[in-house]
Amino acid sequence: MPIFDTHAHYDSGGFNADRDAVLSTLPAAGVGLVVDPGCDVLSSRAAVALAEKYPHVYAAVGIHPEDCGGCTGADFDAIRQLCGHEKVVAIGEIGLDYYWAENPPKEFQQQVFRRQLELARELDMPVIIHDREAHGDSLAIVLEYPEVRGVFHCFSGSPEMAAELLKRGWYLGFDGPITYKNAKRAPEVAAITPLDRIVVETDSPYLTPVPYRGKRNDSRYLPFVLEKLAEWKGVTAEEMTDITWENGLRLFGLEERV
């Protein structure tokens, strides 16, 4: 089976010079599907436009915690409207980011996060969660919405947090950082994550895996992530590719569409 990159920002300015060249060649390179999550209304619309242009691209729409400052009711209305598009498969990238001091205030991030979780509950859509240096609050808030499911993108929490999410039906996303020498927690998290809850991501153009760390990332580098996961889980890289393909289809409700 081909590779499913469940999180890549091809609408990013990092691809302005060669976006079409990269996206057009992905199927021949073994990448069968990509989900492009928006980070605000503008990038969500751009993600939808890419999904309209390329059969192998789907979109998620949402307001990222780093980009939520000053968002208004009109922004939420726009996201709601975009959710009705046939190629929008999730609400995301949403969540909390306490890493950057210049980010919007924590309380406002939480308010925006909750509002989008409420929309996901109303529309019965999965969510893509961004959680950076906000593990306790991120977990507490998603537990307020037990009907909502999705994926914690580039999961960086503890094995204990992972266990809580897995118990409630969440998926965990694994990215390039699992190939880094300082990836100490990731093997512990992978060890307790069932094979049927693992999805792979690039977060392109960011988080490029070893041996290409420092270069711009794209979906063609995902085999390095798959190989590391396969090694940790005691399966072949081909088996891990097949497993994560099926998991991605199930997560985003694409089993009958692909």
Image (cartoon, rainbow, N blue to C red):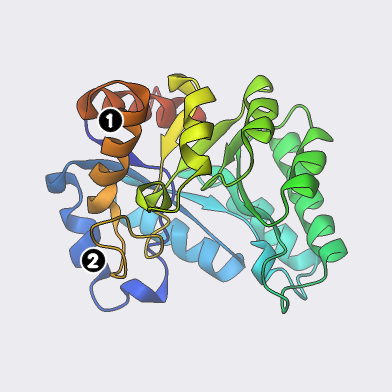
Residue hosting label 1: 241
Q: Residue at x 28, y 70 (%)?
A: 215
Residue 22 x/y as whole percent: 21, 62
Outermost left residue: 28
Q: Tell me the quarter of the picture where residue 39 sits.
A: bottom right
Outermost right residue: 107
Q: Is residue 149 visible?
A: no
Q: Tell me the quarter of the picture where residue 78 sits.
A: bottom right
Residue hosting label 2: 20
Residue 220 x/y as whole percent: 22, 52
Q: Residues within 10 Å of mark 1 (few under 14, many from 20)?
A: many
Residue type, numbered disc 1 = Thr
Q: Is residue 23 left or right of residue 34?
A: left
Q: Is residue 142 visible?
A: yes
Task: Assign a secondary structure to mark 2.
Answer: helix
Residue type, numbered disc 2 = Asp
Of residue 152 and residue 231, the one placed in the foreground of this image is 231
Q: Considering only vertical position in the picture, is 209 above or below 228?
A: below
Q: Is residue 87 left or right of residue 142?
A: left
Q: Quadrant of the N terminus?
A: top left
